[in-house]
Amino acid sequence: METNQRQSSFLWEGNTLEIHLPIIFNTMEVSKDWNRFLDHLKKDTPRNISIHANDLREADSSGISFLKLVRLECESRKIQFTLFGLDEKFQYRLNITNDDSKKYKEQLADALRKSEQIGKLTIDSLLEFKYLVTFTGELTVSFWRSFLHPSKIRWKDSFRVAESMGVNAFPIIAMIGFLLGLIMSFQSAIPMRRFGAEIFVANLVGLSLFRELGPLMTAFILSGRSGSAFAAELGTMKVSEEIDALTTMGLPPVQFLIIPRLVASLIVTPLLTIVFNLFGLIGGAVVLVSFGFPLVTFVNQVNIAVGLSDILGGLLKSYFFGMIIASIGCYRGLKTASGAGAVGESTTSAVVGSIILVSILDGIFSVLYFYLRI
């Protein structure tokens, strides 16, 4: 009995290892009992381990840790663990320790997951930037090479893309331009009528269309219509490995596929901008004529308000907008991954990216024109 009070006892009952804890269970006893416990496990693997703590009256943190470690060892070895007679105050400390360890493991796992996500995002961003720089450089070299040697451009494909991008887009460009001019004229004429200044609606519509709304709205329409088509076409070719086949045959995809689309976009976008501006003016003229002003008055007001610099400034914007639309659409198409939804993701990215970059570039042009007094 005295021995049982001073140190733990280890007894085998068939396939069960029974551990009887002493009255005082502190650091000195724990270190010895842990080594004895491991020695028993090396000799034979029990099916059950039961700890009897009926006599336990005093225990420090190492004693509670011993119980926890035995439980974890049993879980790792798939051994049935049973604890008998543990006082409530020790049971509470054991549960608190387990809860803290679980919370710590969960927090550590969350931290690792967040670290992995940050690392993955950083690597993906660097790879995306590397690919973008490579694509921009290759596209620039191919474009200037084609500009210096026009015979290298596949004009047949360029005219086919220009027809799809320009001629087929004429109805929607004309309709939206007309409606925008009509709505803008009508909404601005109502408040100006209070001051007898309805005639200046022509100035407002003309300047707005030629400087800002014409190039910007045309670019937005082409982003959703043609930029998405470029991404879908090249994305489908990427998924079906047609682009890999071109590379294998020694045909550079940028020169063979992207340059014709870029040339077509540079030709068509300024022309569609002119169409948009023209029909926008027609919509504004309809409103002013309905207010009783002659058509010649509207035309004269537009001629007074709009100068050559306004027209050329808007066309210069549309030129760069067309370049962005074609480049982003083709870039996202070439970046298409494998899978059922990859083409859809590339198409969405092309449209969103084009609209964002066009808006940013339009802001840059606005600041630049302000300082150049254009």
Image (cartoon, rainbow, N blue to C red):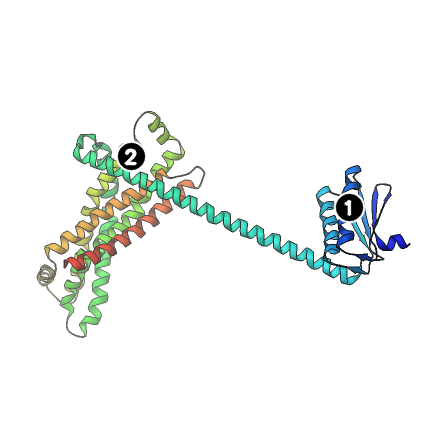
Image quadrant occupied by the C terminus? bottom left
Q: Count neighbours of disc 2 (C-alpha within 10 A) and say few if under 14, some if 14 to 19, many if 20 or more.
A: some
| Pointers 2 and 1 in contact (C-beta within 8 Å) | no
Identity of the residue drawn at 72% across and 53% down: 65
Q: Residue at x 17, y 50 (%)?
A: 315
Q: Residue furthest top?
A: 249
Residue 111 at x, y percent in the picture: 54, 52
Residue 47, x across and y down, in percent: 80, 42
Residue depicted at x 69% and y 55%: 98
User: Residue 80 shows which numbered tag?
Assistant: 1
Q: Residue 158 location in percent, x, y?
A: 23, 36
User: 147 or 343, which is in the foreground?
Assistant: 147
Query: Which disc, if any, is residue 254?
Result: 2
Which quadrant, please, contains the N terminus?
bottom right
The amino acid beneath tag 2 is Val
Name the spot of residue 242 as percent of width and height, x first.
36, 30
